[in-house]
Image (tube, rainbow, N blue to C red):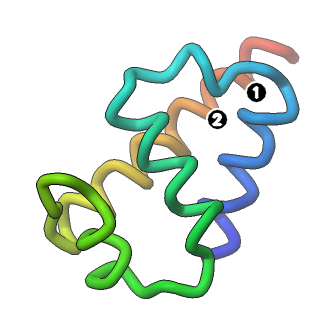
């Protein structure tokens, strides 16, 4: 979804991506690298693989963190 890629691209361009926990950072980079994959297929790119719901939860957390950073800037 565009919401996730927009949040990830903001975090990367602002240099804040490195402030994420490793698990979320890995998720962000995989989402950007494999934009065309659905959640099931993307989840299988992790070692160990993660479920669709686990991936969705991580992506939602990335968006929430991004929104917090944006609020702090205002």
Looking at the rendered structure, which numbered label has been put on residue 44? none
Secondary structure type for disc 1: helix
User: Is 43 drawn above or below residue 58 in the view shown?
Assistant: below
User: Of 10 and 70, which appears nearest the observer?
Assistant: 10
Q: Position of residue 50 (x, y in %)?
A: 16, 62
Q: Residue at x 77, y 48 (%)?
A: 9
Q: Say above or below: 70 vs 46.
A: above
Percent x, y of residue 53: 19, 68
Left or right: 28, with 59 as reference point: right
Front-most of residues 71 and 56: 56
Screen quadrant of the C terminus: top right
Q: Is residue 64 above or below residue 8?
A: above
Q: Which residue is mark 1?
A: 70
Determine which quarter of the picture holds residue 18.
Answer: top right
Across and down, in percent, residue 45 comes to 32, 67
Image disc number at residue 67: 2
* Location of residue 69 by image quarter: top right
Within 10 angstroms of label 1, few (less than 14), some, or many (20 or more) residues? Answer: few
Q: Mark 2 and mark 1 in contact? Answer it, CB < 8 Å.
A: yes
Q: Residue at x 84, y 15 (%)?
A: 73
Tell me what residue is drawn at x 64 percent, y 35 percent. Answer: 67
Quadrant containing the N terminus in the rendered view: bottom right
Structural crowding at the residue carrying mark 2, measured as other residues with C-alpha within 10 Å and reported as few (<14), some (14–19) or many (≥20): some
In the image: residue 2, left or right of residue 42: right
- Determine which quarter of the picture holds residue 3: bottom right
**From mark 2 to mark 1, how far is it between C-alphas?**
5 Å
């Amino acid at each position: 979804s565009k919401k996730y890629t927009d949040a990830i691209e903001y975090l990367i361009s602002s240099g804040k991506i490195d402030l994420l926990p490793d698990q979320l950072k890995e998720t962000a980079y995989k989402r950007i690298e494999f934009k065309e994959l659905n959640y099931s297929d993307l989840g299988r790119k992790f070692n160990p693989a993660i479920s669709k719901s686990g991936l969705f939860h991580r992506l939602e957390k990335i968006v929430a963190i991004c929104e917090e950073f944006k609020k702090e800037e205002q």
